[in-house]
Amino acid sequence: MKNILLFSVFTLLIVSSCAIEQEEINYGKDGCHFCKMTIVDNQHAAELVTAKGKVTKYDAIECLINDLKKRDSTEVGLLLVNDYSNPGELISAESATYLISEGVPSPMGAFLSGFSIKEDAELLQSDKGGAIYDWQAVKKEIH
């Protein structure tokens, strides 16, 4: 009975250690994997979780995009960006709408913000200017 319990606990630890799950960003403490700056802006941060469950955090969406250029796409499990309209909330990078507007600064100077609701991006665009992108288009736009 004791061996079965030990085996069950060991199996649970192995399975949970490889979970593809987002991790909370500790603003003001966590560092950006790409540029090494401390992540302080809860409207522009991003996160990548590998297929093996390793979490990598970024201070700006453009850091995530630039880091993705160096990675094999098969190692990516989950891509997340902050929702500009809901600071601190991580949303799917692939389904987000993006605004690049010089009226909305971002930490690394690309003026890039992500939104869970396209209408929120369009509303800010009508006030601050800029252009709207989907995930595929914004990856091409950011160098």
Image (cartoon, grey):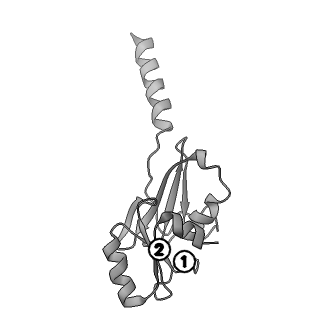
Q: Is residue 55 shown above or below 123?
A: above
- The quadrant of the picture occupied by the N terminus is top left
Marker disc for residue 119: none
Q: Tell me residue 94's x, y (percent).
A: 46, 59
The kind of secondary structure element at disc 1 is loop
Label 2 and label 1: CA atoms lie apart by 7 Å
Q: x, y (%) of residue 2? A: 41, 12
Between residues 120 and 16, which one lies in front from this camera angle?
Answer: 120
- Classify 10 Å Cα crowding around label 2: few (below 14), some (14-19), many (20 and above): some
Relative to 132, 50 lies left or right: right
Residue occupying the point 37% across, 77% down: 121
Residue, x 59% and y 68% (percent of image)?
140
Q: How many marks?
A: 2
At x 40%, y 61%, the residue is 90
Q: Amino acid at mark 1?
A: Pro
Earlier in the chain: of badge 2 and badge 1, it is: 2
Extreme residue toward the right, this view: 70
Q: Amino acid at mark 2?
A: Asp
Tag 1: Cα neighbours inside 10 Å, few (<14), some, or many (≥20)? some
Give left or right: position of 139 versus 22. Answer: right
Provide residue 120's location: percent of width, then percent of height: 32, 76
Using the image, tell me which numbered label, if any, was put on residue 41: 2
The reply to whether residue 38 is visible in this rendering is no
Query: Of helix, strand and loop, which one carries label 2?
Result: loop
Q: Label 1 near label 2: C-beta < 8 Å?
A: yes
Q: Nearer the viewer, residue 84 or 29?
A: 84
Which one is nearer the viewer's eye here, 85 or 141? 141
Say which residue label 1 marks: 107
Q: Nearer the viewer, residue 7 or 122?
A: 122
Let me know if residue 81 appears in the view: yes
Tell me which residue sits at (63%, 65%) in the image: 66
